[in-house]
């Protein structure tokens, strides 16, 4: 796959811009859906590798007011849970598809987390509008976070009665402690941008129409002041205080799959399940070799 092919495949989800020593990854409203396509996950891996090797000294993630919203998370969950006309009549098969979809989503966030924690460049993230709380997890893996003052973090996964699958529980306890994390996650409550700022989860609050400008100025300043060796050393040392990512994400996948097994179903149709699972496995292996 050429880099041009990579950008074309990811076009529905993001676009890359490089200027003044800053690599800017601008997400679209559909960014969350990238994790449901194995080709897109591999394309994202290629993009991140390219950005990591590029001469740019800072990375900036710019979000839209909708890309992490409850609406988009609900759409993702409907796809992950197989709640559509094609599969709803066969709950057993729904569970098999759900398990595979969860693994794909976790694989994407595992890859993203590993990259964020190891790339020798400061990463700045932005938040705007309504943001599903679990998506804050990836932001907390970055070095700097800027949010619109009217941003609201919604605990949508608690309302759906499923645990987060985006690494939130990897980073949030390191910021606010296990007790406050549990209190926040166990209640379907909102976290305002001001509360997130007071808790140290957000570094700068600005008006919505100033978010992108402030983020670009911050990224440009970091590009002038940061050197790869010092940033890599800082990230390596900070990682000593966190559990191994592979261990955490393996546990996250296991617990989420256990939670979604509670979906009520009927007697298994093993012949159809086996055939479709074999086809899915073949597709995964094919994509791994592409």
Image (cartoon, rainbow, N blue to C red):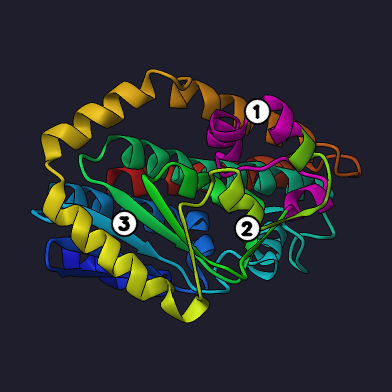
Q: Residue at x 28, y 35 (%)?
A: 118
Closer to the chain start, of discs 1 and 3, is: 3
Which is more foreground, mark 2 or mark 1? Answer: 2
Residue 250 at x, y percent in the picture: 55, 26
Closer to the chain start, of discs 2 and 1, is: 2
Q: Residue at x 52, y 71 (%)?
A: 30
Q: Main secondary structure of the magenta part?
A: helix
Residue 58 at x, y percent in the picture: 21, 54
Task: Identify whether 247 is placed above or below 230.
Answer: above
Badge 1 marks a residue whose secondary structure is helix
Q: Which range of residues does the magenta coloring cover?
A: 155-182
Would residue 51 appear left or right of 285 to someone viewing this image? Answer: left
**Residue 224 figure quarter:** bottom left
Image quarter where the N terminus lies is bottom left
- Label total for image: 3
Asked whether 51 falls inside the magenta stretch, the response is no
Q: CA distance from mark 1 to mark 3?
A: 26 Å
Q: Residue at x 45, y 73 (%)?
A: 28
Closer to the chain start, of discs 3 and 2, is: 3
**Residue 74 figure quarter:** bottom right
Badge 3 marks a residue whose secondary structure is helix
Q: Residue at x 70, y 29 (%)?
A: 255
Give the residue pinned by disc 1: 254
Tell me, for residue 43, which label it has, or none: 3
Give the residue pinned by disc 2: 194
Which is more foreground, mark 3 or mark 2? Answer: 2
- Residue 212 seen by the camera: yes
Would residue 91 appear left or right of 212 to someone viewing this image? Answer: right
Residue sitting nearer the eye, 195 or 178? 195
Q: CA distance from mark 2 to mark 1?
A: 34 Å
Q: CA distance from mark 3 to mark 2?
A: 36 Å
């Amino acid at each position: 796959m050429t880099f041009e092919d990579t950008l074309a495949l990811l076009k529905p989800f993001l676009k890359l811009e490089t200027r003044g020593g800053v690599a800017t990854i601008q997400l679209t409203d559909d960014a969350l859906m990238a994790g449901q396509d194995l080709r897109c996950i591999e394309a994202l891996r290629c993009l991140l590798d390219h950005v990591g090797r590029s001469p740019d000294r800072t990375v900036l993630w710019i979000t839209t007011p909708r890309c992490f919203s409850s609406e988009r998370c609900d759409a993702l969950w409907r796809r992950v849970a197989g709640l559509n006309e094609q599969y709803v009549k066969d709950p057993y098969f729904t569970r098999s598809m759900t398990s595979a979809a969860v693994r794909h989503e976790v694989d994407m966030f595992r890859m993203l987390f590993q990259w964020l924690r190891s790339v020798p460049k400061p990463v700045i993230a932005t938040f705007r509008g309504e943001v599903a709380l679990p998506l804050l997890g990836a932001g907390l893996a970055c070095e700097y976070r800027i949010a619109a003052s009217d941003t609201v973090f919604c605990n949508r996964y608690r309302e759906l009665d499923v645990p987060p699958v985006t690494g939130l529980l990897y980073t949030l306890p390191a910021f606010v402690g296990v007790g406050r994390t549990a209190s926040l996650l166990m209640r379907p409550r909102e976290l305002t941008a001001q509360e997130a700022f007071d808790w140290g989860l957000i570094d700068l609050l600005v008006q919505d129409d100033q978010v992108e400008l402030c983020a670009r100025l911050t990224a440009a300043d970091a590009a002038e002041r940061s050197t790869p060796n010092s940033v890599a050393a800082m990230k390596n040392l900070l990682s000593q205080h966190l559990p191994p990512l592979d261990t955490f994400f393996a546990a996250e996948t296991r617990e989420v799959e256990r939670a979604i097994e509670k979906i009520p179903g009927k007697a298994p149709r093993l012949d159809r399940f086996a055939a479709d699972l074999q086809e899915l496995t073949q597709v995964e292996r094919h994509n791994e070799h592409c």
